[in-house]
Every structure is written in C-alpha cells, then in structure tokens.
C-alpha cells in the first residue's frame, strides 16, 4: 500500500494490544503480499485460503520489510508485532495510513443474502437526488463520484477499500455506500471502517455453505453492526424472519422497513404493469408515490431499505422518490431485454433457489402467457442446491431449459442429473448443455405474452469450461438472436430419460 502523506505511524498507537518484540515499529507503507514488498514496508502476514503469509515472512524481510505483523512470533531479524488476528490488524492499519476517511465520511454499509447491489444503487441515487454526490463500492463497480472502475469483487480487499474511501473523501464527498459480502465481513476486510448506518436487506440460509455453518454465516453478517459508530443506526427488514434474531440482539438504535409487518417505513403497491409499477411510501404521516421501471415485490423491499436510509440522513420523501425513480435498471438484476419482440425477456444473475424463485415469480406477475426459464448450476460448487433449483424451476415456470453455468471440470450432464433429482416430473425439462443453444432455443419457443427468464449469469461476462475462461454475455446472445431470428430455431435437445448414465 502506498506510503502515507503524513509521515510515519507508530504501530503501538494503532494496535495497543499488540505484543512488540524488538522495539517500537514505525511505518509509512505496508503490504500483505510478500511478492510486492518494497524496502521499508511493514509486512502483515495473513493466513489466507490458498496460502499462509507467515510462511513467507523471511522472504518479505529479504525484500526489504522493516518489520512484521503476525499472529505468532517469527524469528526474522526485524521487529515483530504479534496480534490475535492479523486480518483485523491489516484493515486497521490500512485505514490509518489514509487518515481514517470514515471518521469524516457518513458511511452506509449494506449487507444481506439478496438485494445488496440494487439497494446500494438505490441509496446512492437517493443521495444524488438530494444533491449529495457519494462514493459507491459495489459489485457493479468502484466509484469516488468522479471516476469509476470495474469491480473485481463485491467488496474490495482492505488496502483497496482504504484507497477508494480516501479517494471519496478527497473528491469532496460527504457520503460513501459500501456493498458488503458475507465473505468480506468474515475476512475482516472492513476492519478499521466506522459505519454510520448498517443495512441488512434479509438473511437466508442458502448462502451459508462457504462459512461452514449457519451460525458462522450469521456472525459474519452481524459483524457489520459491531462496526457502527457510537451514534450509528441499524436498518432491518421487518418482513424477513431471518432478520428477527439480529433485531433482538442489537444494542443500537434501529429503524425497520416492511410491506406486510408493522414497521417504521412501509409501502404498498398501487399499480403494476409489464414495464413499471407504482408504489406508495409511508413514513409516519408523510407519503410519496414512486413509479419505478424495476418491478416485483422484492424491488419494493429494496426501495424501502433505501428510503429508510434516506430518511435517516434527513432527506425529504420527495427527493427520495426522485432518487428511487432514477434507477430504471441494474445490470443483470432481472434486467429487461427489449429488442422489439412481442414477449418479455429478462436476464438475471441469481444462482440460489431463493433468487431464482423471486425472478420467476416477478416474471409471472408481469405476463399473461407462459414463463420460460433457462438456467444451470455451477460446476464444483454448491451441489446441495442443485435439486432445490430444479424444484423451484419446475414449480414456477411452464417450460424449463437446463443448461450449463460455469461447469468447470465437472460433466455438464452430471450437473443436469443433480438438478433433475429435485423435480417431480423428470421427463418434462429440456436439457441443452450448450448455453448459447439453450438461450436461442428458449427464445424461439416464446410467443406473444410469454416471459423468458435467462438466469444465473446476469451481468457476469465470462464462462468457465474446464480451466478455460471465455468471454460471455447472456444479454448479447439474447439481443443477437432477437434482432436477427426470422423463424423458430430447431435444435436437438436431451430429454432427461435419454441422458447417459454417469455413475
């Protein structure tokens, strides 16, 4: 991480519980990557998923590291600070190097199993509608309000997070919105960040596998609330059963939002059409109508979360409504593809049973015809979710096409078998492992009034086949076919009972 502009920092001041061996440690730059060490850097040894940084401390010192932070004493010939958690130490030190920007920024953290990205975009739009440009760090990109870059991951690693927060502060912003994955919270990437508002959109058990248990998953999500400033505020979904445990355990002021259960901020759907819906927001005695091109009940919940944050920041309902209306779509989040066709096409990135169910339910609410679903499950990941995905697709769609979605080194037909295991009518879905062929065939079957949901990738621009990563876009494939197809595509597809045995 680049050197601080304010001169060297003293480690004991920043990490008072650290045990120093070899004297006080001063530093003006740091890194946790032994390959990137520059002379004078502080090296922070982190025990990662793929490698343990402690094993490379000697190499870091040989490259010029002036001191080491680690979770155990290392005889490396330079001062060593031992800490209980070097990930936490890394975050704290990174934030300190750039002047702890969240002490001056009003920082909003958004976590949850579903809806994080859309809610983050809605909050940013509400702030901008109120004349308050803000920094945004989310799956869709990192922005300091002046420049934006593609996001390699939902939540940046600690050094990059500190860098973007400092850029946001230096750009003159007063606010920053950070989308927080449970993995980022578990890995302490936000250590040293102080939040003014912490939002949990919902809590679903389907995302718990990476954490090893549901308890660990909940602890990761709730880590956000432990980083609230003394006067910080929690925002929770009253409709979500999974959020009730969090609500009961919080020791902080709370505002709730909901459509079905009594909450501080509520809403009702007034009108719903194929291309838009109108909702009425209620906050105490005040109300405001919002007409949004993003549809479905789940989007109402996202709007409520963003409206609650806006009200907590002192923004009036009229400005909040304008901000919500400005977000006409979010790439890959039930994104409509409109190429003059007589049926609806949606591209959605959901890869869990819950997210697939929401996409198909929303499509059902906006069509008078059939719902056609194209989806697959990733290879070498979340195998226990495959039959659940099949069950959801069978129950919510009229025509199901099972295809590939990053099969990696796993046989696509085996993945399809696993999906079909969850279906009551295994002979009904169509299996087309070639994803392009599956999309084109599904579109060729659609008629006026139908809705086609292409699920799984959303705005992701790659497809893994074995070890090969190829450029990909469900959106572009759909658009190409819709613009150029003159007659239905006739393709051979696998019936489930024709699939070869893979046992």
Image (tube, rainbow, N blue to C red):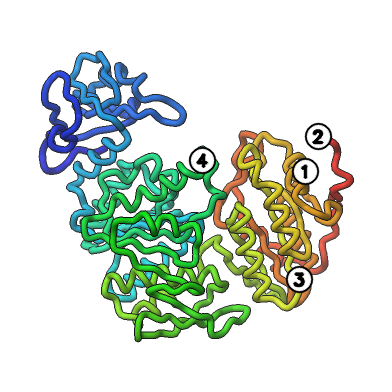
In screen coordinates, is 471 left or right of 286? Answer: right
State if disc 1 and disc 4 touch (CB < 8 Å).
no
Provide the secondary structure element on which disc 3 rests. loop
Q: For marks 3 and 4, give the CA distance.
A: 38 Å
| Foreground pick, 370 / 228 | 228
**Location of the C terminus (image quadrant):** top right
Please identify the quadrant where the N terminus is shown: top left
Label pair 2/3, CB-CB below 8 angstroms: no
Q: Nearer the viewer, residue 418 or 375?
A: 418
Q: Is residue 265 above or below residue 414?
A: below
Name the residue tied to disc 2: 502
For the residues marked 4 and 1, what is the alpha-carbon distance in whole angstroms?
26 Å
Compare marks 3 and 1 and give the one earlier in the sequence.
Answer: 3
The residue mark sitting in front, 4 or 1, is: 4
On the image, numbered disc 3 is attached to which residue?
A: 370
Q: Quadrant of residue 307?
A: bottom left
Tag 1 residue: 417
Q: Earlier in the sequence, mark 2 or mark 3?
A: 3
- Of mark 3 and mark 4, the one earlier in the sequence is 4
Q: Considering only vertical position in the picture, is 318 above or below 48? A: below
Residue 58 location (% of width, % of height): 30, 16
How far apart, in angstroms, are the residues tagged by discs 2 and 4?
30 Å
Residue assigned mark 4:
213
Mark 1 or mark 2: name the one nearer the start of the chain. 1
Circles 1 and 2: CB atoms closer than 8 Å: yes
Q: Secondary structure at mark 1?
A: helix
Please indicate, yes or no, whether residue 146 appears anywhere in the rendered image: no
Q: Could you tell me which secondary element the residue under label 2 belongs to? A: loop
Counting from the top left corner in percent of width and height, residue 13 is at 12, 36
**Callout 1: 10 Å neighbours few (<14), some, many (20+)?**
many
Q: Measuring 23% from the left and 38% from the top, which residue is drawn there?
A: 93
Which is closer to the viewer, label 2 or label 4?
4
């Amino acid at each position: 991480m680049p050197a601080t502009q304010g001169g060297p920092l003293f480690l004991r001041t920043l990490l008072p519980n650290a045990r120093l061996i070899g004297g006080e440690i001063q530093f003006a730059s740091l890194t946790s990557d032994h390959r990137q060490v520059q002379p004078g850097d502080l090296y922070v040894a982190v025990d990662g998923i793929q490698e343990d940084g402690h094993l490379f401390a000697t190499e870091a010192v040989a490259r010029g590291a002036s001191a080491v932070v680690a979770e155990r004493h290392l005889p490396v010939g330079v001062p060593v600070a031992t800490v209980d958690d070097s990930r936490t130490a890394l975050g704290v030190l990174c934030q300190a190097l750039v002047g702890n920007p969240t002490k001056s920024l009003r920082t909003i953290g958004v976590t949850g199993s579903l809806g994080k990205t859309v809610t983050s975009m809605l909050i940013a739009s509400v702030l901008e509608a109120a004349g308050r440009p803000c920094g945004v760090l989310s799956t869709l990109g990192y922005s300091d309000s002046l420049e934006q870059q593609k996001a390699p991951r939902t939540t940046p690693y600690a050094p990059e997070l500190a860098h973007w927060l400092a850029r946001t502060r230096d750009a003159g912003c007063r606010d920053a919105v950070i989308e927080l994955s449970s993995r980022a919270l578990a890995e302490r990437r936000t250590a040293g960040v102080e939040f003014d508002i912490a939002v949990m959109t919902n809590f679903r058990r389907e995302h718990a596998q990476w954490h090893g248990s549901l308890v660990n998953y909940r602890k990761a999500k709730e880590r956000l609330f432990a980083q609230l400033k003394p006067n910080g505020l929690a925002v929770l979904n009253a409709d979500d059963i999974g959020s009730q445990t969090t609500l009961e355990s919080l020791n902080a002021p709370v505002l709730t939002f909901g459509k079905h259960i009594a909450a501080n901020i509520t809403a009702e759907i007034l009108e719903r059409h194929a291309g838009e819906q109108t909702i009425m927001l209620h906050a105490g005695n005040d109300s405001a109508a919002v007409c949004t091109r993003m549809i479905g009940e789940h989007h109402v919940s996202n709007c409520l979360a963003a409206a609650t944050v806006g009200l907590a920041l002192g923004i009036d309902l009229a400005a909040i409504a304008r901000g919500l209306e400005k977000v006409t779509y979010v790439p890959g989040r039930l994104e409509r593809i409109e190429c003059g066709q007589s049926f609806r096409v949606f591209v959605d990135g959901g890869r869990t049973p819950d997210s697939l169910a929401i996409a198909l339910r929303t499509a059902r609410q906006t069509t008078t015809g059939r719902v056609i679903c194209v989806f697959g499950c990733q290879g070498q990941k979340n195998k226990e979710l495959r039959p659940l995905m099949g069950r959801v697709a069978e129950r919510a769609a009229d025509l199901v096409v099972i295809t590939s979605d990053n099969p990696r080194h796993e046989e696509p037909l085996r993945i399809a078998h696993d999906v079909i295991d969850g279906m009551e009518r295994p002979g009904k879905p169509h299996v087309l492992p070639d994803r392009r062929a599956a999309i084109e065939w599904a579109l060729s079957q659609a008629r006026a009034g139908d809705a086609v949901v292409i699920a799984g990738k959303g705005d992701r621009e790659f497809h893994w086949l074995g070890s090969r990563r190829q450029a990909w876009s469900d959106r572009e494939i759909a658009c190409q076919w819709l613009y150029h197809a003159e007659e239905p595509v006739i393709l051979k597809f696998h019936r489930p009972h024709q699939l070869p045995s893979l046992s």
